[in-house]
Structures are given as structure tokens and as C-alpha cells.
Amino acid sequence: MESYQQQLSQFIERVKHNTEQYLGYPVSKDFDYQELAELIQYPLNNLGDPFIDSTWKVDSRQFEREVIEFFAKLLHAPENNWWGYVTNGGTEGNLYGLYLAREIFPQGICYFSQDTHYSVSKNLHLLNMRHIMIRSQANGEIDYEDLRETLRIHRDLPAIIFANSGTTMTEAKDDIGKIKSILNEFAISQHYIHSDAALCGAINPFLSPKPSFDFADGADSVSISGHKFIGSPIPCGILVARKDRVDRIARSIAYIGCLDTTITGSRNGFTPVVLWYAIKKYGAEGLRRRAQHCLDVAEYTLQALQSIGVEAWRNPNAITVVLPEVPEAIKIKYQLATANGITHILCMPNVETSHIDQFVADLKEARV
Ligand SMILES: *Cc1c(COP(=O)(O)O)cnc(C)c1O
């Protein structure tokens, strides 16, 4: 029998090994949170609303508030009219956005594109929301004509738009400005727009032209994953919503001496400190440099693949490079996700051109 120490050290070796080569998932690994290690000795828990002090004091709420404030500004949330919390990931933020929308417009229909993240259908089912899937264009962006035709038929009902800013497979971005003009065309004033910016929420603010995806463009809520572009050892995310939208659901709970505005009761108290540490270290300028590095490596990847005859492409300013399905051995070695005959490379902040060179050489060899 192996001792538990042996089992643990073998496991750690395996994790180390499996972290080395991946290129197919949007997960940064270039982080160092050792300075926070001491915190794992404490039962940190941010239960309840991050903006209201609770009877429970072993929390990191003040850090969580700073994180939300940073992202509210980055996403142009209306002054003095924003709220948010650190979630368990992009999925929870999306669920929250849909929850707010349903509470405000119980009769509404949710519209989302074919390329929307797989978890959204499940969330709509959980919330028992009426929904209609809209066709996608070839690049993964919502088909505005199909959306227009569908909204025309249902113009008597409130519209809940679930927009993507960076679809999972091709990093396509639905244009909220265009969507708003369709809503205006049919005078659908009762609408709610949620922006799923899991990957791109912390990249888009630094792009030019800036994609139409945030509060300035008409979003009511935005969800971002923390462990994707920013990087975290534990999955987490950021949800920011217009405060007037959240006030509708706030309910005071005597037991915690706080408002029950979040989905779960107990909440992670460690990840808000992780995100706080990241924004302190990077600042907006550091995030901008990170984004630029990704864009440069993505362009390099595209050129390198095309130079060996691979029909690769990428959406404008995307850090995702799309290519036809690759041989099984390559898929396994680089942990590449494949769907509908395409696969993709995610040029995350940790990816360097040397890593791409190795991948391209392997692919070239596997194809002959
Ligand atoms: C990753 C992703 C999600 C889910 O986010 P998690 O942080 O994994 O929960 C949702 N939408 C899109 C577009 C994503 O890429």
C-alpha cells in the first residue's frame, strides 16, 4: 500500500506535467500567489452581500469591493448605480444575469445564439425561462437578421438578450449596439441585456475599436471569469450589474445580518483576495500589456499555421486561432477541444512563440 504522502506527491507530479503543454483551453497559468499562502489556514467566507457588513467577520469583503469597483470602472458601469460580487466562475455570473432578467421580466423571452456556452441552456432550464435560439454566422457571431425576424414576431413581449463577447470556440463577439438598434426598431422598450464576457471582459476594454459589450453600450449585467485571462488557482469570476436591477431582488436575512443578494450562501473568501492581488500587481496598464502580448502571439500563430498550409483563421482582435480538426495525437498532447470539425488554440498570457513553434512543428510532422 502506498502511503498518502506518496499518493499526494504522485498527484502533484501529474498536475505539474498536465499543466505544461495545454493550448486548447482559455486558462492562464502565469501567476504566483505564494504571498497569499498563509490565508489557507483560515475559514474565510464572504457569505451575503459584499457591500454590507455581516455578523460574521472572517471575510475578505473589503477586497471583494475593491475588485468589483475596479471592474465596474473598466466596464463603464453607471456612476453610483453598480453592484456586483466575486462568483465561482463565469457560469454563475451568467446565471445571475438571467435571474435578474427573469425577476424583472417574468414574461420575457431570452434570445441567445447557437454558439452560446453550453451551460446557458441548463441555466435557462433551471430558471424555467422561455427562450429561443438564434442562428450564428459562420464566424460564431449572432445572425442579426435571424434575431430581427424573431424579435419582429415577438415584439409584444419583453426581450432578454444573452449576448456573447467571445464565444467559446471562435471568440466571436455579438455587437450590443447593433442588437439595441434592432430592439429600438421594434420599439421593444422592455428589455434586458446580459453580456457574457467570460474570456474577453478584461481584454475588450483595451482593444481598439472597443467591442460593443459593456454598460456604456447598453448591458445591464456583465459576467467575467477570473481564472481565464487573469489567472487563479481556484475557479472564480466577476459579476457586475446595474444596481437598480439588483435592488428588485434584495432581501434582508436576520441570521447573517446581511442581504441575501448572491446565489450561494457561503461564498469563497480566498478568490476575492486572489483577484485583488492580481489587479494590484497588474493595474489597468498591466492588463493592457497582457492583452497585447496575447494578440501578438495569436497573429504569430496564425501566420505560422498558414505558412505550413493549415487553413487557420481568427476573428478580429481575437486571441483564439481556429483551425480544422487535428490528428488525435496532437489533440491529446496539447489538450485541444474539438467541436463541429474545428479546433482552436488559445493564446493566453503565458503562451510564448517558442511554445507555438513546437506545436506547429508537431502538427507539420503529424500531417505528412
Ligand atoms: C468559459 C466560458 C463560460 C463559463 O465560464 P466558467 O468560468 O468556466 O464558469 C461561459 N461563457 C463563455 C463564452 C465561456 O468561454
Image (cartoon, helix red, strand yellow):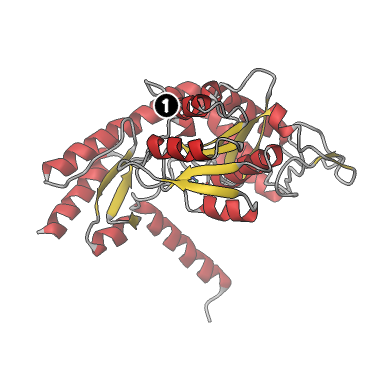
Check disc 1 and give the amino acid type: Pro
Quadrant in which residue 332 is drawn: bottom left
Q: Is residue 162 left or right of residue 310?
A: right
Instruction: Point out residue 204 in the picture as x, y percentages from the top left corner.
Output: 44, 28
Quadrant in which residue 178 is drawn: top left
State whether residue 215 appears in this view: yes
Residue drawn at (24%, 42%), measured in percent from left and top?
Answer: 354
Q: With respect to residue 285, does 255 lie above or below?
A: below
Q: Is residue 204 left or right of residue 302?
A: right
Under circle 1, the secondary element is loop
Looking at the image, which residue sits at the far right?
254
Instruction: Point out residue 239 in the picture as x, y percentages from the top left corner.
Output: 61, 36
Q: Nearer the viewer, residue 227 or 150?
A: 150
State whether residue 287 appears in this view: no
Can you identify the residue that label 1 sits on? 211
Ligand 1 has an atom within 8 Å of the beta carbon of the residue at disc 1: no
Residue drawn at (56%, 55%), measured in percent from left and top?
Answer: 122
Looking at the image, which residue sits at the far left?
368
Q: With respect to residue 132, does 51 lie above or below?
A: above
Please identify the quadrant where the C terminus is shown. bottom left
Instruction: Point out residue 100 in the picture as x, y percentages from the top left corner.
Output: 67, 39
Looking at the image, which residue sits at the far top?
79
Q: With respect to residue 10, does 347 lie above or below?
A: above
Q: Which of 306 and 354 is in front in this view?
A: 306
Instruction: Point out residue 84 in the picture as x, y percentages from the top left corner.
Output: 66, 33
